Image (cartoon, rainbow, N blue to C red):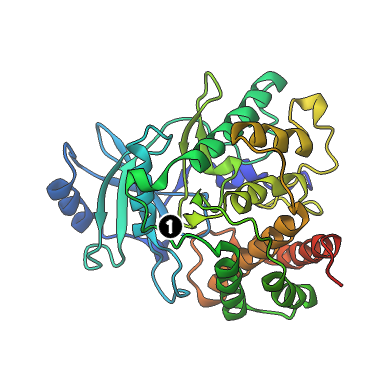
């Protein structure tokens, strides 16, 4: 990265003044919180978190406490996107099990309060690391964080979703078929240029889905910068950003998380950074093979078959997600001021997806 460029940490850490297009009527919100959140006491100050491209996220500051508000973005939206009500449901259910998520306070479906639906949860204090090499800490702490985030995702996939009231959180079975269809539609709706490899993946993926169907809760965007880490012991305090969560195939979720080891080029935006071409052993980060073994041990698996398909699918999916962000830039509804930085990442992701499809047998 050019030394004159902002690092991801500088771009995305902390809060800023709320952008004009995302401003919230403070008085109306404060009245609502007084009436609906136990122990809430104003006056209220609203800040916008820098990180995140999808659902606008705000820090609510009062004299005694900080809260977090997530809302649907205003304006034209893709079908089924920005389902903050689903986020609220899964976080609330998982919190009851002791899984590391924030405590939720209130879901508001009344769009008249701030213009869109939203929910309020606790502000979990800790570190958010935006770059996978975590250069600001030592190798021992780095190794602990990678071990902890592997164990946390394994715990999610090992959770019995029926026992915590999430049996209707998605449709068990045919996860990849439904996801490929969804991201194909959203990619086409947001398309700004023709990418041959994406078109090839759209044709190839639905016809080559492995037969080993499983169902668990999946996060959908599980990565280092979507979790709060304890400053003292490197444990995961909270997993954030559950917008893409559903019932799905745990291996699809894990291999999405695994893409950091396989990401092409010199991706610098959140979610597209890479560990490739890095001497991982010297800085305490496990290799992809060791990380896979760690996950298999945590979930009682022998190994992961069909990994090339899963990597191909996830590169396609991430390309679709980023294309959706570009579409929101086009439509004026992107939440982050850095959303345009993603435009040059879609093509290399599609090319990587087709590379792994070819490794899996595509011609």
Mark 1 Cα-neighbour bin, 10 Å: few <14, some 14–19, many ≥20? many
Q: Position of residue 304 (x, y in %)?
A: 71, 45
- Judge from the rendering whether residue 316 lies leftward or rightward of residue 62; answer left or right: right
Q: Residue at x 80, y 64 (%)?
A: 357
Q: Is residue 62 above or below residue 360?
A: above
Residue at position x 70%, y 56% in the image: 310
Q: Is residue 289 visible?
A: yes
* Total residue callouts: 1
Q: Nearer the viewer, residue 301 or 157?
A: 301
Please indicate whether residue 68 sits to the left or right of residue 225 in the image.
left
Residue 214 pos. (x, y %): 56, 53
Given residues 20 and 35, the one toward you in this image is 35
Residue 6 position, x and y percent, is 67, 47
For residue 59, say whether it is visible: no
Secondary structure category for the residue under label 1: loop
In the rendered image, the vertical position of residue 273 relative to residue 231, given as above or below = below
Residue wearing tag 1: 56
Q: Is residue 199 above or below residue 291?
A: below
Assign the C terminus to one quadrant of the image: bottom right
| Res. 276 image quadrant | top right
Quarter-wise, where is residue 356 in the image? bottom right
From the viewer's side, name the closer residue of 51 and 261.
261
Q: Nearer the viewer, residue 110 or 155?
A: 155
Point 52% across, 61% down: residue: 173
Residue 192: x and y in percent read 66, 79
Relative horizontal placement of residue 296, taking residue 68 as reference (left or right): right
Against 18, is 319 above or below? below
């Amino acid at each position: 990265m050019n030394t004159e460029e902002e690092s991801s940490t500088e771009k995305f850490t902390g809060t800023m003044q709320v952008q004009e297009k995302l401003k919230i009527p403070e008085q109306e919100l404060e009245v609502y919180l007084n009436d609906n959140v136990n122990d809430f006491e104003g006056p209220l100050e609203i800040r916008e978190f820098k990180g995140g491209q999808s659902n606008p996220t705000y820090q609510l500051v009062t004299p005694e406490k900080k809260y977090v508000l997530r809302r649907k973005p205003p304006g034209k939206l893709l079908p089924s996107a920005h389902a903050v009500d689903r986020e609220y449901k899964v976080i609330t259910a998982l919190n009851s099990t002791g899984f590391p998520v924030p405590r939720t306070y209130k879901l508001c479906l009344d769009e008249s309060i701030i213009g869109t639906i939203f929910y309020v949860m606790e502000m979990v204090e800790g570190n958010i690391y935006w770059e996978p090499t975590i250069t600001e800490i030592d190798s021992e702490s780095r190794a602990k964080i990678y071990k902890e985030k592997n164990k946390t995702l394994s715990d999610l996939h090992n959770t019995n979703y029926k026992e915590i009231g999430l049996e209707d959180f998605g449709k068990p079975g045919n996860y990849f078929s439904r996801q490929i269809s969804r991201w194909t539609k959203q990619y086409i709706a947001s398309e700004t240029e023709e990418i041959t490899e994406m078109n090839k993946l759209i044709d190839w993926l639905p016809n080559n889905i492995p037969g080993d169907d499983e169902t668990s809760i999946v996060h959908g965007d599980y990565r280092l910068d979507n979790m709060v880490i304890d400053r003292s012991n490197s444990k995961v305090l909270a997993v954030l950003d559950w917008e893409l969560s559903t019932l799905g195939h745990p291996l699809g979720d894990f291999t999405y998380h695994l893409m950091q080891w396989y990401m092409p080029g010199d991706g610098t935006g959140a979610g597209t950074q890479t560990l490739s071409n890095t001497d991982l052993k010297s800085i305490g980060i496990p290799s992809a093979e060791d990380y896979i073994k760690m996950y298999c041990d945590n979930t009682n698996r022998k190994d992961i078959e069909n990994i090339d398909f899963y990597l191909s699918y996830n590169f396609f999916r991430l390309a679709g997600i980023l294309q959706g962000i570009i579409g929101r830039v086009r439509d004026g509804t992107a939440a982050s001021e850095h959303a345009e930085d993603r435009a040059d990442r879609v093509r290399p992701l599609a090319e990587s997806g087709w590379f792994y499809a070819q490794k899996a047998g595509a011609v």
